[in-house]
Amino acid sequence: MTPTLTTPSTITSASRCRFADDVRDFLTQQPRQLPSHYLYDELGSALFEAICRLPWYPLTRAELRLLEAHAREILDPGVTTVIELGPGSGVKLSALIAGAGTGRGPLDLHIVDVSRSALDEASRSLEGFENVRIVPHERTYEAGLEEFGHARSVSERRLALFLGSNIGNFDPQGRDAFLRTVRAALNPRDALLLGVDLVKPERELLLAYDDPLGVTAAFNLNLLARINRELRGDFDLDGFTHRALWNEESSRIEMHLRSNRRQSIRVHEAGLDFVMGEGEMIWTESSYKYDPPEIVSMLERSGFGVRAQWIDAVDGFALTLAEAL
Ligand code: AVJ
């Protein structure tokens, strides 16, 4: 008999089971694929942090500049509650609060992430602010938003943040559904700030997703290493090459892992045993890129009115502030 499981190991085995199911379902589709959120285990998250410091991946720095330059307008004194979906290390929210200056009432900061370690890190970096209450939610974005839809006081005015061009991971249908979920958690006059990477010359996009130091390649290949570690897989990492492609028609960067040769693969804990041909690919991520007017119309379709849009023309990044209608 299995002894009674403590909460943490129950969660671990449940999420491992989920991972195994997804790996089986997605790797057996045509084309073979894997959900991109699995890129972010502990090592994957550290590699993503490193990507954000690469000179070829300017998104994070461009967004931070825009946040600092327009902090007062974004975080106007009427806002009582900020909800950030995916706070990362908390630097962006810190920059916003610092940039908006003093002279406001108490601020509630709700941070939503599936990763406990991300929530802990963000909480630590926000701790120093006075008059601020940090409320971490260890939830998916959707589950977190659902929670906010309910309990709220009349005097609250909310600002939701969805930054880092994370919206780029959704396909158009998922994106619209997600924006409507955000809208449903807000009341009229609440706001949403959306950070989105813009369409730019192909050569710049490819450098951002296939950098000369190979950090993005390591980030992508780590997904196979994670499957090996957590699900007893036998992927030979040398047998795969990182590929970044610009899909002009769909306006998205795609990351793939290309099989360098014909090879058989087993993933024990997913009950998987299959053969990949030479040149066959596993599609691991899409990052959709937009033009500024497309951002305005996706927000308008989802029940928002755009109040302001700030663009960093050097690196091609937009922050759009929209009001719930
Ligand atoms: C965190 C999803 C916004 O798509 O640019 C970075 C992830 N992938 N380099 C992006 C990523 C490859 C990133 N997002």
Image (cartoon, grey):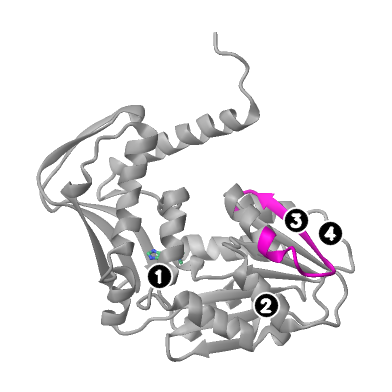
Q: Is mark 3 on a helix, strand or loop?
A: strand
Tag on residue 152?
4
Using the numbered discs, state the Cα–Cα distance from disc 4 to disc 3 in whole angstroms: 14 Å
Q: Nearer the viewer, residue 222 or 272?
A: 222
In percent of width and height, residue 39 lies at 41, 52
Give, as a single range, the part of the protein colored magenta.
124-141
The amino acid at mark 4 is Arg
The local crowd at label 3, few if under 14, some if 14 to 19, many if 20 or more residues have their Cα within 10 Å, is some
Using the numbered discs, state the Cα–Cα distance from disc 1 to disc 3 in whole angstroms: 31 Å
- Marked residue nearer the N-terminal end (2 or 1): 2
Using the numbered discs, state the Cα–Cα distance from disc 2 to disc 4 in whole angstroms: 23 Å
The amino acid at mark 1 is Tyr
Pointer 2: what residue? 96
For the residues bearing labels 2 and 4, Cβ distance under 8 angstroms: no
**Farthest residue toward the bottom?**
313
Q: What element carries label 1?
A: strand
Residue 36 on the magenta span? no
Pointer 1: what residue? 288
Tag on residue 135?
3
Where ligand 1 lies, by image quadrant? Answer: bottom left
Residue 184 seen by the camera: yes
Q: What element carries label 2?
A: helix
The amino acid at mark 2 is Leu
Using the numbered discs, state the Cα–Cα distance from disc 2 to disc 1 in whole angstroms: 25 Å
Q: Quadrant of the C terminus?
A: bottom right
- In the image, what residue occupies the spot 61% across and 70% down? 91
Residue 128 on the magenta span? yes
The local crowd at label 1, few if under 14, some if 14 to 19, many if 20 or more residues have their Cα within 10 Å, is many
